[in-house]
Image (cartoon, rainbow, N blue to C red):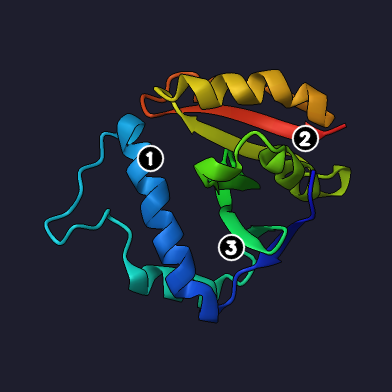
């Protein structure tokens, strides 16, 4: 793979991240059933993106491949099964850059033995993404399990992942 850089997003990147998130929501609308708002945007508020970047500096990372912006990853700290756990909340690679191992490189850079177990969710109807993770996590050196209370979620398929 070419030179991938995973760069923490700053407050100055809010506009770029917001625009990438609109593309992500557009693509995900096929599975999320989310409608576009009357003003022509998906339900992602720019002020919320700014506020989250300000309050949670480790929340977003921009992905660059050979100097070209190619996507983003959002990491949330969530309550799950009575404990706090990091979640790969959203991982988006622009279509032009898919198939180059970017998602795998991002996951292996973030999910290390030192970071413990993570939550990874895909839209239940996004069978391609769900199959991708189940097929490729072992190749990335990741163990995964389906959480007991994640099996009944109507919106998401959830996996608990950890680096071996």
Q: What's the distance in space between the residues labelled 1 and 2, CA to CA?
A: 27 Å
Asked whether the residues under the numbered discs 1 and 2 touch, taking CB atoms below 8 Å apart as contact, a structural biologist would say: no
For image coordinates 55% across by 28% down, the residue present is 158
For image coordinates 38% across by 40% down, the residue present is 27
Mark 2 or 3 closer to N-term?
A: 3
Viewer-nearest residue: 118 or 74 = 74
The numbered dot on residue 59 is 3
From the image, tell me which residue sits under label 2.
Answer: 162
Does 79 sit above or below residue 63? above
Q: Is residue 84 visible?
A: no
Q: Locate residue 129 relative to residue 5 in the image: left or right.
A: left
Q: Secondary structure at mark 3?
A: loop
Q: Locate residue 59 relative to residue 110 in the image: left or right.
A: left
Residue 162 appears at what percent x and percent y? 77, 35
For image coordinates 69% across by 64% down, the residue present is 67
Viewer-nearest residue: 59 or 25 = 25
Find residue 34 and report its image quarter. top left
Query: Quadrant where the C terminus lies?
Result: top right
Q: Secondary structure at mark 1?
A: helix
From the image, tell me which residue sits under label 1.
Answer: 27
Find residue 111 and report its image quarter. top right
Question: Please, which residue is most extreme toward the left here?
Answer: 38
């Amino acid at each position: 793979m070419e030179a991938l850089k995973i760069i923490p997003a700053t407050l100055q990147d809010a506009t770029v991240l917001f625009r990438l998130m609109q593309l992500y929501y557009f693509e995900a609308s096929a599975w999320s059933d989310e409608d576009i708002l009357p003003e022509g945007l998906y339900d992602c508020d720019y002020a919320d993106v700014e506020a989250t970047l300000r309050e949670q500096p480790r929340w977003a990372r921009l992905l660059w491949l050979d100097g070209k912006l190619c996507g983003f990853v959002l990491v949330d700290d969530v309550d799950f099964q009575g404990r706090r756990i990091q979640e790969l909340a959203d991982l988006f690679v622009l279509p032009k850059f898919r198939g180059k191992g970017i998602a795998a490189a991002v996951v292996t850079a973030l999910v290390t033995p030192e970071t413990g177990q993570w939550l990874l969710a895909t839209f239940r109807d996004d069978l391609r993404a769900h199959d991708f993770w189940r097929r490729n996590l072992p190749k990335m050196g990741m163990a995964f399990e389906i959480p007991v209370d994640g099996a009944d979620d109507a919106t998401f398929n959830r996996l608990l992942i950890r680096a071996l």
